[in-house]
Image: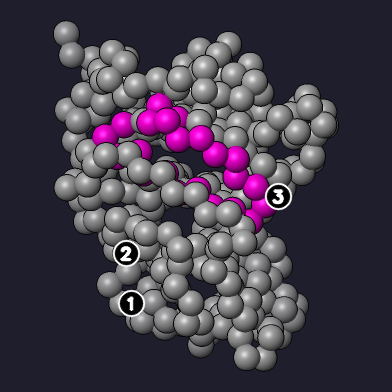
Amino acid sequence: MTRVITSHRQTEGAGFVVRRPFPTVAVPHLDPFLLLDEMGPVDYAPGEAVGAPDHPHRGFETVTYVLEGETEHADSAGHRGTIGPGAVQWMTAGAGIVHSEMPSRTIQTEGGRVHGFQLWVNLPARLKMTTPRYQEIVAAHVPEATSHDGLAHVRVIAGHALGVDAAIDTHIPIVYQDWTLRPRGTTHLDLADDLAAMLYVFSGAVEVGADAHRVVDGQLAVLGAGDHVSVTSPDGARFLVLAGTPTGEPVARYGPFVMNTQAELEQAVDDFRSGRMGRITHTARRASTLTNASVAPVTTLADRSTEPPPPSRPS
Ligand code: FE
């Protein structure tokens, strides 16, 4: 383990609160990952739940993993989906997409608990302008496995674990696992040496590696060189394991766009403003998302932006 990052709280989209280990000023990204947000857990009263109405992305992938609640998705490539508890949505924005991510009508009108994750996976230069792609895996189709002693359970979102392969196809090698350890449970993670790897604890506490370094709820541990590590939990825990092949490329970032150069960012802003990333066809949408998205101006260029100033506008 090379470092531990304690997540901070931040408001996103139309005003939902997230726990965010990165990006921060000190840790702008953990190549190939650009952002990890834990949304909630939060209990919304009727009429209180908010999401992220129509906004663009280019140059990377957004991965939504819902633990509780329900998110409704619509995008300019014509994809529609309702992501319920245990389901995964892997959206490759690639060359550009406009999408909305809203709580379901039930959550909006009746309230309810919302808990989940959003991960941003960077794309290497050769894939930044790839055709947008949408993968959605319902909970029942997310592969799962349990250790022989019954104390460790994993849901395999990307990559493989305990002999089980993920259903999701990724552009670059990515590992995304959701582990549950019962008290005194242990797992031995095999992670190829060329992957950048980390784990994020979102319940309880774990002890990592030979030093039994303690990592607690809300902390992200960045793993160092090596191809395996053991994780133990004296009292039970739940954590994500994330790993991927670093792009090793420069990251130019402006809100919802992540490219390699400032000129590419300016092009992205231009393409979005002139409508070349498309728009969501509202006639095909459900009433609940229509209500929110159609009245909300697209002002989310600063969406999830941490530090970079706006690119200079071409004159
Ligand atoms: Fe988004």
Q: Nearer the viewer, mark 1 or mark 2?
A: 2
Q: Marks 1/2: CA distance? A: 10 Å
Comes first in the chain, label 2 or label 3: 3
Q: Contact (CB < 8 A) between labels 3 and 1?
A: no
Q: Which residue is located at x 26 percent, y 35 percent?
A: 95
Mark 3 CB near ligand 1 (8 Å cut)? no
Q: Which of 120 and 311 lies nearest the eye of the viewer? A: 120
Looking at the image, which is closer to me, 210 or 180? 180
Closer mark to the observer between disc 3 and disc 1: 3
What span is in magenta?
75-96
The amino acid type, in three-letter code, at marker 1 is: Ala
| Local SS, label 2 | loop
Q: Is residue 84 above or below residue 79?
A: below
Q: Is residue 94 magenta?
A: yes
Position of the N terminus, as image quadrant, is: bottom left
Which residue sits at x=64%, y=20%?
287
One can see residue 168 in this view: yes
Is label 1 in contact with label 2 (beta carbons under 8 Å)?
yes
Query: Which one is nearer the viewer's eye here, 266 or 151?
Result: 151
